[in-house]
Image (spheres, grey):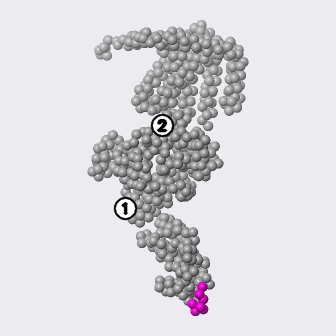
């Protein structure tokens, strides 16, 4: 069951909301409605689901309604129509007390410009959510410290926000949100106010944290690169409507319409696609079972000039070339170890293609993709070039 | 052509209204006049009973610490207060100070909640703003007249007039301070599930504090000026010396009492300003 379920959620700012909703139904555009009723359409019939533990990115340019949408999820903005289910409860219709309870227990928010309280110390800032809930001072101090440790600010607890850099301030914002131990983290352009290098660090750190915590994260951004980096799935917004929802690959490879395509055009594919996307199923021989004869036979079948060697547990051992194998057969050598070459070019699954390009350039054999020293797949030069050219025939079924 | 109506008896209406107020609410005004008046006199007497040397020392020490361990204000306080003592105006100084202290306290006690109400309600703001404008632009002397009607003469009508004249800055600055709290901070407190009260006390008031303190500083200064004017309706203190010097055309003693007021004003102003700065860091 999805933890967040948004159905037909709309927000119209203005006085003639009913009329505007009717016009939206008739398919009228945002600008036309503004002209006719004076209302601004913030969000138009958004529907999506977010699974538990997922990083769901809502992305769009400024004015696309993404910040409004995230505020509709925790009802900082009152929805005009539609429903928002968090853990099965509909926030759109619940009373103030229930809303407060859900905000305290299930939803935390991280803000674009940090929104730290300047008159409170770092620790007191991180304690805020728990303090609001009436948690005992000692208890909340302990939890807040844990959250601050988690984001690497354990030694700054007595500083004030003004004494910290932007990146550190946002870590405090993150710690404040985590201290509550919420089910869902709403992050509104959380890294947009940081300079690019720090932004990248924070993205990495968020991904590391996410691996440990497995929270559900709804992340708002206007930066497609950021969306592709951290999102498990991405919803693209335009003029208040969601135009496409999909995994980063789906969006890159199959843009739903011109708008998405235009967006995606600017993305440097070599940065987005990783080894995983272009690797192929490897042909291998097992060093424990096979000798040079089998290796040679396989190579002839597949038309290869070399073949990778693994052990019974798929651990990569090295490779043998056709020349060496045929030499070994003549000399009656039975053991692959004697002709094994171990100068294997290897990359991780998530190595960006840009970097693979450099490796593959000066190696005679395909590049091996490994994870924990187990062979996952191989990359041949042709696949890299094809992917760079934007062809969609990428094979990920290693 | 403009005489299509006879003169509207506006002043009569106001007089009648004031008379009506005085008669109808005498059950409120009288106890205030008597009991609060007694309290004020007692308070002023107690202040005057403290040996001047102790008052001067306490003020100097407070000034030293409140300005961040600097000697300037402390030295000024010692010299200034000694001069007032030397001129035989100590008792009047204490009366004036008692009036200012109580009038300012009441202004703050009334002004801050009204300011909060204004910041929370558009309707309240629309209603209260013109009232504040009226209170501040009406010549201060005018308030003395109903003050006498309600509370006869002495300290109480002085404080009443001062309240009307000096409360608006606290109200305005409280309203402004709370409205200026950044939208994101308000959202942050709401997103974590604050109640309205929690939001007010944990976020809005602390954020608005320095603005509110600036308003309080203005209120204190205005109530000092009003307390001096209130000597015309029998409020005791330095103002009374100025008034009698004026009536007898005694330039010298008029200025001496005036300088006493200036010294008090400077000390009070620097104290309230530094209280604000000290906490804002």
Is residue A334 within the magenta segment?
Answer: yes
Q: Are marks 2 and 1 in contact (CB under 8 Å)?
A: no
Query: What residue appears at the point 53 percent right and 39 percent down from the top-left corner?
Result: A134
| Residue B124 left/right relative to B41 | left
Residue located beneath label 1 in the image: A256
Q: Quadrant of residue B14?
A: top left
Please report the residue visible at 54 percent of the width from the left and 16 percent of the height from the top: B159
Q: Closer to the camera, A70 or A136?
A: A136
Residue B2 lies in quadrant: top left
Above or below residue B122? Residue A330 is: below
Q: Chain of mark 1?
A: A
Considering every residue shown, the one lying at the far top of the view is B248
Instruction: Single out the residue that lies furthest toward the left.
Output: A26
Q: Same chain for labels 2 and 1? Say yes or no.
A: no
| Outermost residue to the bottom | A330
Q: Which quarter of the rendered picture does the N terminus of chain A lie within?
A: bottom left
Residue B195: image tag? 2
Residue drawn 57% across the image and 71% down it: A373
Residue A178: percent from left, percent from top: 54, 49
- Residue at 70% across, 17% down: B52
Q: Give the magenta range.
A: A329-335
Chain holding disc 2: B
Residue B184 in sight: no
Q: Nearer the viewer, residue B212 or B204?
A: B204
Pick the front one: A294 or B187: A294
Query: Would residue A152 be counted in the magenta stretch?
Result: no
Q: Secondary structure at mark 1?
A: loop
């Amino acid at each position: 069951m999805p933890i967040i379920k948004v159905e037909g959620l709309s927000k119209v700012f203005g006085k003639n909301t009913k009329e505007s909703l009717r016009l939206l139904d008739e398919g009228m555009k945002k600008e036309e409605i503004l002209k006719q009723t004076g209302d601004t359409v913030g969000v138009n019939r958004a529907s999506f689901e977010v699974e538990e533990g997922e990083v769901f990115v809502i992305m769009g340019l400024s004015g696309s309604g993404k910040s409004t949408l995230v505020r509709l999820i925790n009802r900082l903005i009152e929805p005009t129509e539609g429903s928002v289910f968090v853990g099965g409860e509909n926030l759109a219709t619940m009373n103030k007390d229930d809303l407060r309870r859900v905000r305290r227990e299930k939803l935390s928010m991280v803000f674009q410009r940090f929104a730290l309280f300047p008159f409170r110390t770092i620790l007191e800032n991180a304690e805020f959510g728990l303090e609001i809930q009436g948690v005992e001072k000692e208890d909340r101090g302990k939890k807040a410290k844990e959250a601050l440790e988690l984001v690497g600010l354990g030694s700054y607890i007595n500083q004030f926000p003004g004494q910290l850099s932007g990146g550190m301030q946002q870590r405090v914002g993150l710690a404040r949100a985590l201290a509550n131990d919420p089910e869902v983290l709403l992050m509104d352009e959380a890294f947009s106010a940081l300079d690019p290098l720090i932004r990248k660090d924070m993205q990495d750190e968020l991904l590391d944290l996410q691996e440990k915590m497995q929270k559900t994260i709804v992340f708002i951004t206007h930066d497609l690169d950021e969306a592709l980096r951290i999102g498990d799935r991405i919803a693209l917004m335009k003029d208040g409507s969601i135009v496409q929802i999909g995994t980063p690959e789906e969006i890159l490879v199959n843009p739903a319409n011109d708008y998405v395509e235009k967006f995606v055009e600017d993305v440097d594919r070599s940065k987005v696609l990783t080894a995983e996307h272009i690797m192929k199923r490897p042909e291998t021989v097992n060093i424990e079972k096979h000798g040079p004869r089998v290796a040679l036979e396989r190579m002839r079948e597949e038309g290869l000039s070399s073949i990778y060697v693994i052990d019974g547990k798929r651990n990569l051992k090295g490779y043998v070339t056709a020349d060496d194998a045929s030499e070994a057969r003549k000399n009656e050598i039975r053991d692959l170890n004697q002709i094994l070459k171990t100068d294997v070019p290897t990359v991780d699954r998530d190595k960006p293609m840009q970097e693979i390009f450099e490796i593959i350039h000066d190696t005679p054999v395909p590049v091996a993709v490994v994870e924990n020293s187990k062979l996952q797949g191989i990359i041949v030069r042709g696949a890299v070039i094809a992917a760079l050219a934007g062809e969609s025939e990428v094979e990920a079924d290693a | 052509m403009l005489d299509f109506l006879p003169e509207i008896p506006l002043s009569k209406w106001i007089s009648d209204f004031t008379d009506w107020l005085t008669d109808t609410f005498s059950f409120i005004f009288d106890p205030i006049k008597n009991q609060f008046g007694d309290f004020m006199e007692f308070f002023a007497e107690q202040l005057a009973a403290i040996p001047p040397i102790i008052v001067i020392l306490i003020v100097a020490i407070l000034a030293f610490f409140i300005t961040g361990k600097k000697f300037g204000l402390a030295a000024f306080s010692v010299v200034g207060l000694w001069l007032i003592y030397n001129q035989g105006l100590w008792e009047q100084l204490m009366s004036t100070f008692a009036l200012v202290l109580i009038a300012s306290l009441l202004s703050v006690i009334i002004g801050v909640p009204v300011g909060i109400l204004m910041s929370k309600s558009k309707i309240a703001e629309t209603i209260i703003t013109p009232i504040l404008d009226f209170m501040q632009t009406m010549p201060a002397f005018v308030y003395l007249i109903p003050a006498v009607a309600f509370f006869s003469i002495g300290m109480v009508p002085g404080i009443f007039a001062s309240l009307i004249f000096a409360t608006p800055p606290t109200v305005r600055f409280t309203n402004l301070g709370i409205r200026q709290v950044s939208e994101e901070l308000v959202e942050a407190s709401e997103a974590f599930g604050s109640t309205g009260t929690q939001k007010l006390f944990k976020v809005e008031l602390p954020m608005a504090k320095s603005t509110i303190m600036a308003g309080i500083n203005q209120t204190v200064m205005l109530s000092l000026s009003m307390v001096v004017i209130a000597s015309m309706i029998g409020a005791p203190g330095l103002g009374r010396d100025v008034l009698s010097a004026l009536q007898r055309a005694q330039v010298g003693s008029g200025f001496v009492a005036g300088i006493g007021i200036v010294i008090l004003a400077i000390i009070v102003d620097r104290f309230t300003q530094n209280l604000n700065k000290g906490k804002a860091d």
